[in-house]
Image: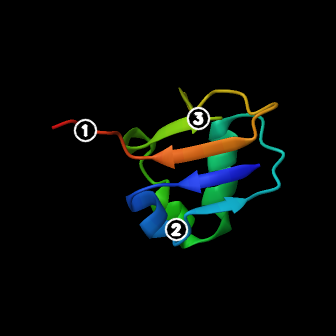
C-alpha cells in the first residue's frame, strides 16, 4: 500500500511517500506499526489529534478498516483564509 505524507508530517519523517507491506487491519494499527519503526515516525504520529487521514483520497477516521485500500495519506488539518 502507498503511504503519503504531507506538510510537517513529511518534514518529520523525511519522505513524501513510501510503499509499505502491512498486516494492519485499521489506520490505527498502521500508525502503531509506523511509530514502532524509528523515532522520526514516533514524532510524526505523536499527536493523532493534530492529523487527518484519507483513504484512497477520501477523508476518513483512524479506526477505519484498511481492507482493499491502496493509498493512505496523512496530513494536518486544512485551514482556510
Q: Which mark is residue 33?
A: none
Dot 3 lies on which element?
loop
Q: Are marks 1 and 2 in contact (CB under 8 Å)?
A: no
Of the two numbered discs 2 and 3 in the rendering, the one whose residue sits closer to the viewer: 3
Mark 3 or mark 2, which is nearer the start of the sequence? Answer: 2
- The quarter of the picture where residue 50 lies is top left
CA–CA distance in space, label 1 to label 2 = 22 Å
- Residue at image point 56% right, 69% down: 15
- The quarter of the picture where residue 65 lies is top right
- Residue at image point 81% right, 31% down: 68
Determine which residue is flagged by label 1: 79
Q: Quadrant of the C terminus?
A: top left
Mark 2 or mark 1, which is nearer the start of the sequence? Answer: 2
Q: What percent of the width, then of the height, locates residue 62? A: 57, 33
Q: Residues within 10 Å of mark 1 (few under 14, many from 20)?
A: few
Dot 1 lies on which element?
loop
Determine which residue is flagged by label 3: 57
CA–CA distance in space, label 2 to label 3 = 21 Å
Determine which residue is flagged by label 2: 13
Side of 20 where 36 appears, left or right: left
Side of 18 where 15 appears, left or right: left
19 lies above or below 48: below
4 lies above or below 79: below
Dot 2 lies on which element?
helix
- Residue at image point 35% right, 39% down: 77
40 lies above or below 48: below
- Residue at image point 75% right, 41% down: 70
Amino acid at each position: 500500500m502507498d503511504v503519503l505524507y504531507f506538510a510537517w508530517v513529511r518534514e518529520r519523517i523525511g519522505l513524501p511517500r513510501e510503499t509499505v507491506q502491512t498486516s494492519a487491519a485499521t489506520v490505527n494499527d498502521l500508525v502503531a506499526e509506523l511509530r514502532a519503526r524509528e523515532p522520526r515516525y514516533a514524532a510524526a504520529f505523536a499527536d493523532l489529534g493534530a492529523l487527518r487521514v484519507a483513504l484512497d483520497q477520501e477523508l476518513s477516521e483512524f479506526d477505519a478498516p484498511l481492507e482493499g485500500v491502496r493509498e493512505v495519506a496523512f496530513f494536518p488539518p486544512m485551514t482556510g483564509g
